[in-house]
Every structure is written in C-alpha cells, then in structure tokens.
Amino acid sequence: MATHSGGLNTTEDRTAVRIENLVRSFDGRTVLDGLDLSIAPGEFVALLGRSGSGKSTLLRALAGLDHDVAGSGDLTAPDHVSVVFQDARLLPWKRLLDNVILGLPGPFAEERGRAALAEVGLAGRERGWPVELSGGEQQRVSLARSLVREPRLLLADEPFGALDALTRLRMHALLRRLCERHRPAVLLVTHDVDEAIALADRVVVLDRGRIAADLPVDVPAPRRQGSAAHTALRGRLLARLGVDTDEDHGTTGAAGAAGAAGIGRSTRTNGEESAA
Ligand SMILES: Nc1ncnc2c1ncn2[C@@H]1O[C@H](COP(=O)(O)OP(=O)(O)OP(=O)(O)O)[C@@H](O)[C@H]1O
C-alpha cells in the first residue's frame, strides 16, 4: 500500500481506511489535529463528537471533497467511495431509477438500478419522481444510489438526522441488512449515541481534533436499550462527549435527551479512551 503525505490515496489491502496524523485548519483554527484512524474492510464505525468537532471535515477529507483545504497527513481510502448526506440530494427532474443510476457506466446499469430500488423496498417505483416520496423514501433512494455502485467505503453524514423516530428505526434495520449483504466499510457520522450503538461495530469519539475514545460495541444482538451492556457503553460514550448522565444514580431522563443530542458541557480529561 502506497501512501503519500497530504493526499488522498487508494488501497486494496486489508485496511479499507488508514488515516495518520491528519491535520485540517480553517482560517488559522485547527479542526483536525493529528488525527489517526483505521477502518477494516466491512467494518462499521460510528463517529460521534460535539457540534463543530470536525466530523464532517473528516468525512469530506475521506471523500476527497476537500482538495482546496490546507492541511497535512496521510490518508488512504478505497477507490470506490459513496457518500450519503442528511438530505437525499435527488435530482427532482429525473425519475427515481435515473437518479439511482446517474453516471453509472455499463450495459446493466438499469438492471442493477432496479435491483437496488427493490433492495430498499421501492420495487415498482422506478418511474416515479422524487417529489412523490416521503423523506424516508427519498433516503432509501439515496441509499440505493450509493449501494448500486458497490462502494468499498460508505460515508454517511447524519443520514437519518431529519427523519422521525419510527422511520429512523426502520432505516436502521434497512442499513444493517444492506451492510451485511454488501459489506462496505462504513463511517457513519451521528449525534445519536443510541444510533451509534445500534448500528456500529466500533464507536469513535472525536474531540479537540483527535480520536478521544475508540470502543467496540460489545452489546449482544438485538442490542436492546436498557440492557446492562448497552447502558454501560452508552454511559462511557456520553461521558466522553462531556455529558453528565447521572445514570449511576438512577436518573435517566437527562441521559435520554443527551443520547439523542450527543452534546453537553465538557467535563472530560484529554486522555484517549480505548477498548480495555
Ligand atoms: N469550509 C470551511 N471554512 C471555514 N470553516 C469551516 C469550514 N468547514 C468547517 N469549518 C469549521 O470547522 C469546524 C468543524 O466543522 P464540521 O462541520 O467538520 O463539524 P461537525 O463536527 O461536523 O459539526 P456538526 O455536528 O455541527 O455538523 C467548525 O467550527 C466549522 O465552522
């Protein structure tokens, strides 16, 4: 695997993503400060961090969307990267199938697009228009558009942030199924600690431009909220986010709000927490 300082490289080896000493600054303010992170092929990593901590900046760097931003470090990512954003970003003047296969080369693009729409539960809607879809359905099309390209790395920037709670749960189940089938490496940015625990193999917390915690999700399926393992991991993550949950003292109301927001006052030390 070849890596080059300051650029985006590609690799086909056993590491899907390797980031070393990544630095990104805006107007003299350092946002990513020597960040290190690796993701294995097929691994699902959730990225938490307070607002403004640099999560989207990291995603943009991985997507190769920040060529105009000054910075340094080594960054290695696969050739095939897809990005899903909070808004589905469908082209309103194109039918759903055409949105899914937009720019997709090859004679079987239509066939693959139909299969992808069926996979996300939208079989028969190929000739429909984006305006006819709910927010959740639009995000399904966005997922189909990403997965039809068989990415080795799927980057998702709060893809369910605008959805209602029930739709969000359905989308969790769908994303899990799709990832089990297609096995891309995934980096999911979320503000929701419970979403991170529900979906990821590993959760990392970004703080002060570095990875402050890197914890495996050792919660037995079906990862029910309220189980001892779920509650323990949730508490550790919220603590790293600077949220005082009081869960040890038997009050969970504030923790519930904090779990969804992923924000709060800063009380942590600067040390990195990782798997014990
Ligand atoms: N193009 C840019 N020009 C100037 N500053 C920027 C730019 N992009 C990001 N920033 C700044 O970098 C910091 C990190 O932004 P980023 O969007 O990566 O944070 P985030 O963790 O994704 O935040 P949120 O959770 O609120 O979406 C913020 O202070 C933001 O204002």
Image: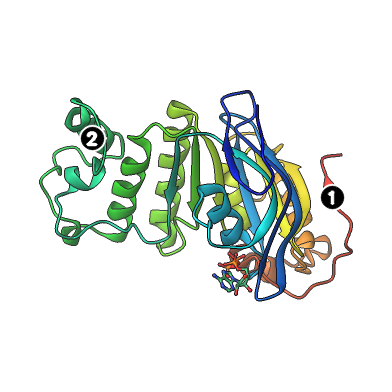
The image position of residue 105, as x and y in percent, is 25, 32
Q: Amino acid at mark 1?
A: Glu
Please give the name of the residue rendered at 18% of the width and 62% of the height, measured from the top-left corner.
131
Position of 263 relative to 91 (above/below): below
Q: Nearer the viewer, mark 2 or mark 1?
A: 2
Q: Quadrant of the N terminus?
A: top right
Q: Is residue 195 visible?
A: no
Label 1 residue near ligand 1, CB within 8 Å: no
Q: Is residue 69 visible?
A: yes
Q: Nearer the viewer, residue 250 or 18?
A: 18
Q: Which mark is residue 273?
A: 1
Q: Which mark is residue 113?
A: 2
Q: Amino acid at mark 2?
A: Gly
Q: For mark 2, does the 10 Å Cα neighbourhood hold few (<14), some (14 to 19), or many (20 or more) residues?
A: many
Q: Which mark is residue 142?
A: none
Q: Residue furthest left?
A: 127
Q: Quadrant of the C terminus?
A: top right
The image position of residue 153, as x and y in percent, is 51, 37
Q: CA distance from mark 2 to mark 1?
A: 42 Å
Image quarter for residue 147? Answer: top left
Please give the name of the residue rendered at 75% of the width and 62% of the height, measured from the top-left corner.
207
The answer to which of marks 2 and 1 sits earlier in the sequence is 2
**Left or right: where 130 falls relative to 21:** left
Q: How many marks?
A: 2
Q: Quadrant of ligand 1?
A: bottom right
